[in-house]
Image (spheres, grey):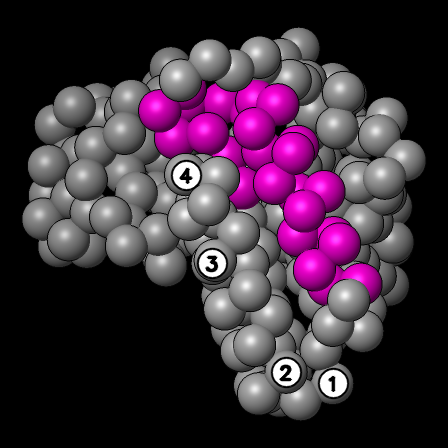
Amino acid sequence: MDHTEVSAVDVAALDDLRDWRVLLGAIHAEFRAGSFSAAAALAASIAEAADAADHHPDLDLRYPDRLRVSLVSHAAGTLTDRDVALARHVNALADDAGASPGPADLQALEIALDTMDADRIRPFWAAVLGYVDDRGALVDPLRLGPALWFQQMDQPRTQRNRFHLDVTVPHDQADARIAAALAAGGTMVEDRHARAFWVLADAEGNEACVCTWQDRGDG
């Protein structure tokens, strides 16, 4: 099916998608519908629209009244104008349902493992997690658990932790998230790659990265 690729920058510039955020190559929105049944009804209306468009999002319904919608063109492996069109339709359905958006609540989690030989250890982690290989990273085939990716090291890391969390947040929430982490006793380890990511650590040196789509060269 014909499609036109769109970038994170393109999406961020669309005023009518101001409640959607780019996280890990997909666009996401979250709505509060007022009740669990209202959120379920909104999910059903989105599912009907998706069938009509032959373009299907991931829908995550949570008590008490939250519905998250995630869109990416899987066949193309990227965001396209089909995602933008369906996101606009979802907005119209949410407006009709009286649901309110909550972009500040969005985030996505990845786990990173530093390694000297990713090919050697990747099969173990795929087996123990029940994950599948997706261009070198391991992903949950049900798209429920966080992805696991492998960071190539030039020399063994013995003095610091080898696992760290990558927390991808909306680009306009990164500063607040970092400030909260620092106020909670964290330290800034490195910010030279901002706004792609900042490396922070807790009081014992365990690291986490706060990430956005910005400054990655592919936005």
What is the spatial separation of the Cα atoms under label 1 and label 3, in whole angstroms? 19 Å
- Amino acid of disc 4: Asp
Give me the disc on residue 54: 4
Single out the mark in the foreground, 4 or 1. 4
Single out the mark in the foreground, 4 or 2. 4
Percent position (x, y) of residue 78?
49, 22
The residue at the point 11 percent across, 43 percent down is 124
Foreground of the two, 155 or 179: 179
Residue 25 in the figure: left or right of residue 114: right
- Amino acid of disc 3: Ala
Q: Secondary structure at mark 2?
A: helix
Contact (Cβ within 8 Å) of mark 2 with mark 1: yes
Magenta residues span 71-95
Residue 205 visible in the snapshot:
no
- Amino acid of disc 1: Gly
Find disc 3 in the rendering and name its residue.
47
